[in-house]
Amino acid sequence: MLGISVYLGEPSFEKQEEYVEKMRRIGFSQIFTSLHIPEDDQVVYKERIQSLGKIAKKLGMELYADVSTKSLQRLGLSWDDADVLLDWGLTGLRIDYGIPEKTVAELSKKVKIALNASTLSQEQLELLDRHGMDVRSVEAWHNYYPRPETGLGREGFSEKNEWLKKQGLKVMAFVPGDGERRGPVYEGLPTLEDHRQQSPFVCFLDLRHHFGVDKVFIGDRSIGEHTYRQFEAYQNRLIILRAKYFLNDIDLKERFSVPQSNRPDEARDVVRSEQSRVEKLAGKPVRPENTTERPVGAITLDNERYGRYEGELQIAKRNLPADERVNVIGRVIDEDLPLLSYIRGGTKFQIIWV
């Protein structure tokens, strides 16, 4: 599942409905917000959380709020008022330290509960279980880390997730946005430090494929237009690759701008377009041209010297030497190189020339 973050205290909050609707169209079905309310903004926050709740209900999205005892008090509520929050459109509460296990267990029978994945312990889970917690309503959510160098490491993250899964809990983590970032640091809001300056889409695939994360949320305010297109395409299991074109043949460039599929018998060294050799090049021979070295991401076309392989499009997954039978027609841009490892046998991909 995919989610976004909406911050009630931002000056741009009034524009958020358009953003939420836009993200809903490409499969984002959950919203995270925070109810840590400044003392002088209580009325505004109450209006905004109710407004966001209405939007979530209208779009069929789940709305989770980060809450504390103090933030509830500022709204004139307590932990006994879960029904009020449900009426406002909230479906879940993210609860951190300091809340009695008995209270959390009782809440789990009314609303979905997100516990702090990093600090959750076996002892705490056993206490919650003894108090009658409904584990079906409970998930484990990792934090995001605004300050560089403070995000989680891969090994510890992996070990924690493995343990959480064994406890029967779904796991959630954040990736940074590449649109409008949230202050005051403006350095991205990832869970993993490795993700801080990476593409949100690459981070999403990393979490899903390598760590078994069930839910991925964008931590920052928004994503860029290209990232939006990547998530949109991925609804149809299509991976978009941006690339530079090296030749002057415009017809050839356009021919390889359409969706293609990697062969089901996945090669070790290259992505092999299943369609390219079958369709041929309208009877035109492929003359040798730019037969240079093939670094990772090189987009190549086998020329007439390769016999029956003539016309096959490939993308190098590792550095390969020059071959007089192989034309180098372009290269995937550096930012999208990590996507190559996710193009497995049968995966659809599309090259967008930039």
Image (cartoon, rainbow, N blue to C red):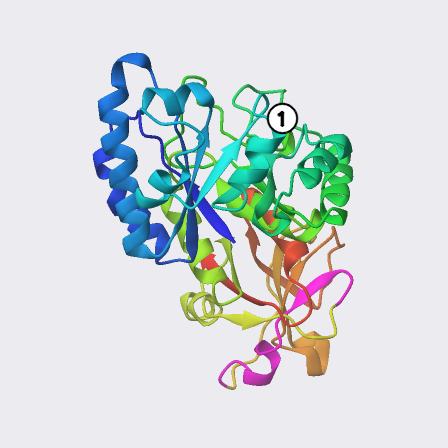
The residue range painted magenta reads 267-282
**In terms of depth relative to the viewer, which is nearer, 59 or 347?**
59
Where does residue 351 sit, x and y in percent of width and height?
A: 50, 61
The quarter of the displayed image where residue 142 is located: top right
Question: Horizontal and vertical percent for residue 174?
Answer: 54, 38
Percent position of residue 135, x then y: 63, 48
Which residue is more in the foreground, 272 or 55?
55
Q: Position of residue 176 (x, y in %)?
A: 50, 35
As displayed, is residue 208 above or below residue 325? Answer: above
Kindly state the secondary structure of the residue where label 1 is placed: loop
Residue found at the far top of this picture: 40
x 65%, y 38%: residue: 131
Compared across the picture, whether 211 is left or right of 96 comes to: right
Q: Does residue 20 lie above or below 185 as drawn?
A: below
Q: Look at mark 1 in the image and give the residue it sits on.
A: 151
The amino acid pointed to by label 1 is Gly
Other-residue count near label 1 (Cα within 10 Å), few / some / many at <14 / 14–19 / ≥20: some
- Residue 269 painted magenta: yes
Give the residue displayed 39% in from the left and 58% down from the top.
Answer: 26
Image point (24%, 40%), residue name: 51
Closest to the observer, 262 or 161? 161
